[in-house]
Amino acid sequence: MLRALLGRWRSSLRLLQPAQVGADRAKISVARLDHEYANKVVALQNVDLNVRSGEFVCLLGPSGCGKSTLLYALAGHVVPTGGSVSIDRQPIHGPGPDRLLMFQEAALFPWLTVRGNITFALAARGVPRAERRERADTYIHRVQLGGFEDALPHQLSGGMKMRASLARALAVDPTVLLMDEPFGSLDAQTRIHMQELLQSIWVRTGKTVVFVTHDVHEALMLGTRVVLMAPRPGRVVKDLEVHLPMPRRPEDAALNEMVRHVGGLLREVEGRAHTTSLPAAPARVPARPVLRPQVLPGP
Ligand SMILES: Nc1ncnc2c1ncn2[C@@H]1O[C@H](COP(=O)(O)OP(=O)(O)OP(=O)(O)O)[C@@H](O)[C@H]1O
């Protein structure tokens, strides 16, 4: 039984080599990305990442490893100090309507109803008035908020606000959805519920999603890929493809075996980060760090 289980999770998690997702086939292409903040912190160094259309990529790593900086570079809110980011082979020079960034806060206008928040966003994107209400209601139902169309944000729970925010994000139909720990402030049960909801919506829409988290279980519940990052300097250390069928259940045994394994990798990264002595102003590390990936068995 145990052997069968181990066999199942091992064959479901594969180490991905950069060449396996070529830039030519990628929806999002990040090449040799560097970012150094004004205070000399090297948030990202030499990051390569290609994301295929319809992938759900989770950026996982300890605090300070550059997950958000990478996400904001994709959103166009951070202008990297080196390298390039392109979407559909078009270089990114700033924010654009093809990408939508979601945060931990639902960021709803408090004076607008749930429907009003969504129709406002649709108006801002140039959706004709006649279409806005119907489209808003479609997504309100999709996130299971039917009956709350006319509720104001203060009348909603944290999870409901996040569902409203998700409905708004989906209604404007970006090509790429960028999510920065969106469920980080929710209680454990609501968080699981939101993960299940997001999964079912993703299965249905096939959106390209890049999702930042430091929670291994969340990454493996949601991701078709988990990109493990390490800090000082921020970099990618492992790119893992997750072949577990969707929808995934939080209690699934194979998923939880995988969580234990990836959790071990994360602890290794965290351990190394803590033993690294930091100079007061971290200098730029000249070469890409030597990685010794623990190669997982292939298919
Ligand atoms: N605006 C900024 N100015 C200076 N340094 C910054 C700025 N934003 C982030 N940093 C630094 O860059 C590094 C990467 O930060 P980033 O927020 O991208 O990491 P993260 O992995 O998302 O962390 P967390 O999980 O804590 O949000 C950190 O050392 C952080 O202190």
Image (spheres, grey):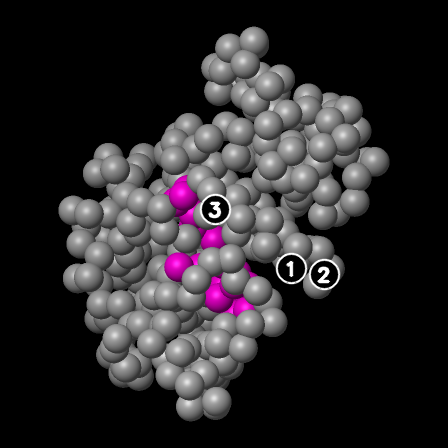
Please state the total of marks drawn on the protein image: 3
Q: Which residue is mark 2?
A: 189
In the rendered view, does 237 fall on the left or right side of 104?
Answer: left
Q: Which residue is mark 1?
A: 192
Asked where in the image residue 120 lies, by quadrant, the reply is top right
Q: Residue at x 36, y 51 (%)?
A: 55
User: Could you tell me if residue 159 is visible in this image?
Assistant: yes
Q: For the residue marked with disc 1, what is the amino acid? A: Ile
Marks 2/1: CA–CA distance: 5 Å
Asked where in the image residue 147 lies, by quadrant, the reply is top right
- Residue 52 belongs to magenta span: no
SS assignment at label 1: helix
Question: Do residues under tags 2 and 3 come within 8 Å of each other at their CB atoms?
Answer: no
Q: Residues within 10 Å of mark 2 (few under 14, many from 20)?
A: few
Residue 230 screen position, x and y as percent: 40, 71
Front residue of 176/49: it is 176
Question: Do residues under tags 1 and 3 come within 8 Å of each other at their CB atoms?
Answer: no
Marks 2/3: CA–CA distance: 20 Å
Q: For the residue marked with disc 2, what is the amino acid? A: Gln
Q: Which residues are magenta?
A: 206-224
Q: Residue 202: which numbered mark, if any? A: 3
Quarter of the C terminus within the rendering: bottom left
- Residue 220 belongs to magenta span: yes
Q: Residue at x 42, y 28 (%)?
A: 97
Ligand 1 within 8 Å of disc 3? The answer is no
Q: For the residue marked with disc 3, what is the amino acid? A: Trp
Marks 1/3: CA–CA distance: 15 Å
User: Could you tell me if residue 165 is visible in this image?
Assistant: no
